[in-house]
Image (spheres, rainbow, N blue to C red):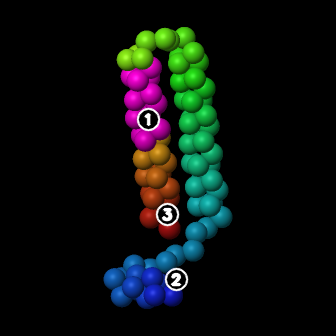
Amino acid sequence: MERLRKKDADAGISEKPLSDAQRAAIAEARSIHEARVAERRIMHHAAIIKTLDPEERQALDDGLRRDLERFESERESKVRKIREDA
């Protein structure tokens, strides 16, 4: 860890402690992400139960994967923005 901190310091990257408000905002962003993922998984499961066609199931699986990747990307960008506003 110390080597990584030194490497960051040499690169001009400084570590700033997060405020309580930033911690709360990050926790809220993660909580919202978890809720969206759970909701999407429930919807996916309900749709999978209704279909027997393998191609349609594959399309539903692909849609779930894309949505989960998008949710994760949105969460990471929100957290990054909160950290940068420090």
- Mark 3 or 2: the one toward you: 2
> Judging from the image, what secondary structure is the residue with disc 2 in?
loop
- Mark 2 residue type: Met
Q: Which residues are magenta?
A: 57-70
Residue depicted at x 60% and y 26%: 42
Q: What secondary structure is marked by label 3?
A: helix
Distance from disc 3 to disc 2, alpha carbons, whole Å, reads 20 Å
Task: Let me know if residue 43 appears in the view.
Answer: no
Residue 1, percent across and down? Answer: 52, 83
Q: Is residue 47 left or right of residue 81?
A: right
| Above or below for 11 versus 20 | below
Mark 2 surroundings: few (<14), some (14-19) or many (≥20) residues within 10 A: few
Question: Of the numbered discs in the image, which one, if any, rests on residue 34?
Answer: none
Please tell me which of labels 1 and 3 falls first in the chain: 1
Q: Which residue is mark 1?
A: 65
Which residue: 51% across, 87% down?
2
Indicate the amino acid at tag 3: Arg
Q: Answer with the quarter of the image where residue 67 lies.
A: top left
Residue on which the image places disc 2: 1
Check if residue 65 falls in the magenta segment: yes
The Cα atoms of the two marked residues, 2 and 1, are separated by 34 Å
Q: Position of residue 12 (x, y in %)?
A: 36, 82
Residue 54 vs residue 19: left or right?
left
User: What residue does disc 3 label?
Assistant: 83
Name the dominant secondary structure of the magenta segment: helix
Instruction: Report if the CB atoms under discs 3 and 2 are less than 8 Å apart.
Output: no
